[in-house]
Amino acid sequence: MMEKLRFYILSGIAGFIFTFIFSIRNNLWTTSMARAFLAFVIWFVLAFLLKGLLDIIAGRNGNSPKAGKSADTGTAQEDERGAVLDLATPDEDEELMDMIHSENGSKGKGGFVPLNPPKLVSTKDPEELAKAVRHLAEK
């Protein structure tokens, strides 16, 4: 717990120093100190939130890593979940062969029909279109 508190305080001090150094050049020392104190508080809170977020991502739910795993079997199963990656794919050779044979037999019935989209043809007069383009170009 003391290590975490030390980390939070050091983060706050770093924010205090950076803010004070960059603020003292343009402000009075009292204004710089007030802004640096505010930066200390903000950096302290950000370090606290970042550490909590990293603990959540790492899967630590507030227990210290030194305490070890609990004897509860439900918790042990939850800790192991997602630890093993199975890269083997199931055999689907028979299913694929059935699909290929069914496609070959159905060519006479439906077969491949290419996409035939409608053509975009303008029914407007070309002079009228040219006037519209000139009008839009003037704006």
Image (cartoon, helix red, strand yellow):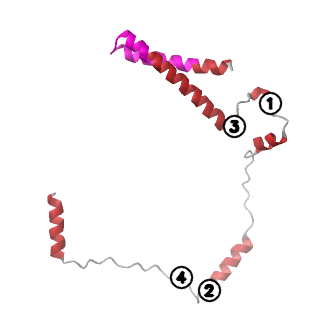
Give the distance between the C-alpha atoms of the residues marked 3 and 2, in whole angstroms. Answer: 53 Å
Residue 49 lies in the magenta stretch: no
Label 3 Cα crowd, 10 Å radius (few <14 / some 14-19 / many 20+): few
Which mark, residue 112?
4
Residue sitting nearer the eye, 99 or 23 = 23
Q: Is residue 85 above or below residue 23?
A: below
Q: Is residue 97 left or right of residue 112?
A: right
Q: Amino acid at mark 4?
A: Phe
Label 4–label 3 contact, CB within 8 A:
no
Q: Residue at x 72, y 54 (%)?
A: 87
Label 1 Cα crowd, 10 Å radius (few <14 / some 14-19 / many 20+): few
Label 2 Cα crowd, 10 Å radius (few <14 / some 14-19 / many 20+): few
Magenta-colored span = 9-35
**Mark earlier in primary sequence (2, 4):** 2
Q: Residue at x 35, y 11 (%)?
A: 28
**Mark earlier in primary sequence (3, 2):** 3
Q: Amino acid at mark 2?
A: Ser
Instruction: Report the residue marked by disc 1.
Output: 68
Give the distance between the C-alpha atoms of the residues marked 2 and 4, in whole angstroms. Answer: 10 Å
Instruction: Report the residue marked by disc 2.
Output: 106
Which mark, residue 59?
3
